[in-house]
Amino acid sequence: MNFCSECGQPVSVEVPAGDNRPRHVCHACETIHYSNPNIIAGCLPVYQEEYILLCKRAIEPRIGYWTLPAGFMENNESVEQAALRETFEEACASVTISKLYTLTSIVHVNQVQMLYLAELTSPEYAASEESLEVELFHINEIPWDQLAFQTIHNALRFYIEDKKNGKFPLHTVLLDTVPGEYIRETHA
Amino acid sequence: MNFCSECGQPVSVEVPAGDNRPRHVCHACETIHYSNPNIIAGCLPVYQEEYILLCKRAIEPRIGYWTLPAGFMENNESVEQAALRETFEEACASVTISKLYTLTSIVHVNQVQMLYLAELTSPEYAASEESLEVELFHINEIPWDQLAFQTIHNALRFYIEDKKNGKFPLHTVLLDTVPGEYIRETHA
Ligand SMILES: [Zn+2]
Ligand SMILES: [Zn+2]
């Protein structure tokens, strides 16, 4: 941010009175501009318990790699509505949400990703503007070395582990700058 | 938003190519400016199972009304870290998080509130710059008519109901424009 989005004058970076963090401050109109994490909402769509719907990304980043349907939550919708919308937009699939399954704070990019466990009741899906291919993968045939993101890897691994116990608790994860590493904050 | 925060030129509101929602677009530097929901993180601090720590707000909105410690999640922290930080800033209290307890999409203000069930292990707390008073209330003496927000009302009611069953599932709520009303999206 270089200019005030309200009045167009240059902003400076400083700690406002009563605050303890640097913000973008406009002295022309006295607006303080805050920057906060964004929410990524999506689904882990399961078909007949052993098949998972993955999308091959048609857009950067990680074009050509497989992911779960997920994207930025928009204004004027709930987290669940965002997850369902993204699943429809990326996989042309209508799913039924069963529960919030992963909550990942991706600290180094200021994102919070929430993935819902969801059921695909009939095998209807298709590629879209955002996905080159959409495919059901058996849990024994996940393309582990072609996954787009660490969060997707984690979610799939959680599902396969949890399936053995028949319990699917919420997994809270803190992902930091070290690629491939993650800290599980709590066991729910 | 009236001006581009990157280049300072006026922005226009239009649907960008490949998108389906109006955005603030700058034609001078070709930046698309997105606006997305913000996360409010906080705690429901419980002491000896029957006492809840509430804060009397020292700042607008709803100054003088009682609330749970919560506030905007900042960049470079996890949701849990934000909840703990806000509890320390507003109530000078250190708590132990047990689990994510409420997830409320407050659609009309583009906020997602996440409250954690937490334990206050010793009755140490104090007023702060953000709280006029901080007090432990027995669950039979909650000041229901002096609560700051519907989300706080909901969380306290969930706790009191759930305590009877000894189970504290995640409560997912969609709060819309009608004051006092809420839709519980899922029972977990
Ligand atoms: Zn300004
Ligand atoms: Zn611009």
Image (cartoon, coloured by chain):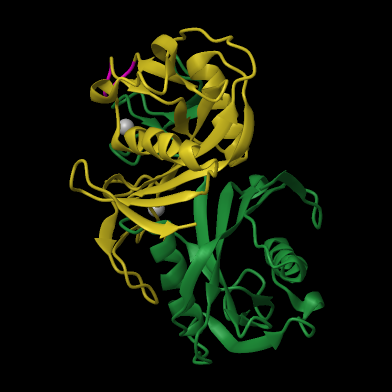
Chain colours: A yellow, B green
- The magenta segment: A59-63
Q: Quadrant of residue A142?
A: top left
Q: Which quarter of the frame holds ligand 2?
A: top left
Dominant secondary structure of the residues highlighted in magenta in the image: loop
Q: Position of residue B69 (x, y in %)?
A: 55, 73
Q: Position of residue B109 (x, y in %)?
A: 62, 49
**Residue B1 seen by the camera:** no
Q: Quadrant of residue A183?
A: bottom left
Near-viewer residue (B141 or A35) = B141
Q: Is residue B92 depicted above or below A175 in this figure?
A: below
| Residue in view at x 28 percent, y 27 percent | B29
| Residue in view at x 59 percent, y 87 percent | B134
Near-viewer residue (B163 or B93) = B163
Q: Quadrant of residue A154?
A: top left
Q: Residue furthest left?
A: A178
| Residue in view at x 52 percent, y 62 percent | B99
Q: Is residue B69 depicted above or below A165 in this figure?
A: below
Left or right of B178, for residue A169: left
Q: Position of residue B110 (x, y in %)?
A: 58, 46
Q: Position of residue A176 (x, y in %)?
A: 25, 50
**Residue B72 seen by the camera:** yes
Asked if residue B93 is among those painted magenta in the image, a careful observer would answer: no
Q: Is residue A68 depicted above or below A177 in this figure?
A: above
Asked if residue A60 is among those painted magenta in the image, a careful observer would answer: yes
Left or right of A111, for residue B142: right
Left or right of B49, for residue A47: left
Q: Is residue A188 depicted above or below A162 in this figure?
A: below
In the rendered picture of this protein, how many numbered marks are placed on residues? 0
Q: Residue furthest front?
A: A164
